[in-house]
Amino acid sequence: MKAKLGIAPIAWWNDDLAELSDDVSLDECLRQAAEAGLTGMETGRRFPMDMAQLGPILARHGISVCGGWFSGMLLDGDIEAEKDRIAAQHAFFVAAGAPCIVYGEVARSVQGERNTPLSRKPVISEVEMAAYGRKVSDFADWSAKQGMPIAYHHHMAAVVETEAELDLFMKHSSVPLLFDAGHMAFAGGDNLRVIENHHSRIAHVHTKDIRRDVTDGLDRTRESFLDAVIKGAFTVPGDGSLDFEAIVRALAQKGYEGWFVIEAEQDPKVSPPLEMAIKGRAELKRVMDAAGYEVEA
């Protein structure tokens, strides 16, 4: 089985919390990722959405685009409007040869609201989830037919956060899944059970780790998702609480092949991005070797 190792630029520049950002250029960010032994980078706010500009920079470091976030609003929005909103990114990702666009639902989400506690995340009924699932499925079908699949990102503080919510969404949709170990663990879910139940739909993997003492110590009636990030809820594999050997072995046993992307928003002054990238890549390579993956250069 073959796999590739990438990283998200959120370790260097946090799009939601500018204060948790390193003052480095895109070129330096890519240089550090390559030094860490990674071959892919998801897009972020300092990426030009034009391959004529970005292509030579990527090529200089042997890095490819391995995904990137789209802030979707289908929960309350119109499919045609979302097609217009995603059009430029869609065309860019096709040109870049990216594997997928990461769809993150932000309608009603409190993930970017510093003063809104986690307990006030949106919650909808199964009837509403069924309608939402059909809408996202239609959007995903359209996107794939245009040459770029989406992968749905379950996410803390959003409408699909918990394992039960993910189960309902998967029941009522046909959308490819982005499996994020850190977000599922933070939400109280069982990562191995999620893989067992939904492995046939997993199209992209974020290898985010958590610091269990931080997530367990949160007062979710008072503290927000961004508060948790600032406190250090997330980190890279090998630096946190999750058993990535078991997680990666489970994915291997179900035949997953594709990208494993390190994604851990942290304070770069406390957790230097290059150091974290090297640590995360080393741990992933160790557990992937044990699981029988061949990591492509």
Image (spheres, grey):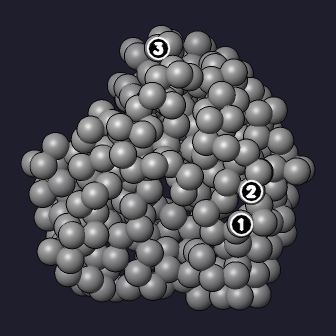
**Residue 157 visible in the shown view:** yes
Query: Relative to residue 112, is residue 143 drawn left or right?
Result: left
Query: Relative to residue 14, is residue 97 drawn left or right?
Result: left
Q: Residue at x 41, y 16 (%)?
A: 2
Residue 244, given in percent of the width and then of the height, sits at 64, 34
Query: Relative to residue 268, is residue 208 drawn left or right?
Result: left
Residue 257, given in percent of the width and then of the height, sits at 37, 26
- Taking depth in this image into account, of 87 and 290 the one nearest to the observer is 87
Q: Image quadrant of residue 117?
A: bottom right
The single residue placed furthest to the right in the displayed view is 270
The label nearer to you, 3 versus 2, is 2
Looking at the rendered image, the quarter that the N terminus falls into is top left
Q: Which residue is mark 1?
A: 18
The label nearer to you, 3 versus 1, is 1
Q: Which residue is mark 3?
A: 296
Question: The residue under label 1 is which amino acid type?
Answer: Ala
Q: Is residue 25 above or below residue 18?
A: above
Question: The residue under label 3 is which amino acid type?
Answer: Glu
**Residue 150 visible in the shown view:** no
Q: Residue at x 38, y 85 (%)?
A: 124
Q: Which residue is mark 2?
A: 21
Whichever of labels 3 and 2 marks the residue nearer the N terminus, that label is 2
SS at mark 3?
Answer: loop
Residue 239, given in percent of the width and then of the height, sits at 80, 38
Q: Is residue 184 above or below residue 83?
A: above
Label 2 Cα crowd, 10 Å radius (few <14 / some 14-19 / many 20+): many
Q: Residue at x 23, y 60 (%)?
A: 87
Residues under numbered marks 1 and 2 in contact, where contact means CB atoms less than 8 Å apart = yes
Residue 62, given in percent of the width and then of the height, sits at 51, 20
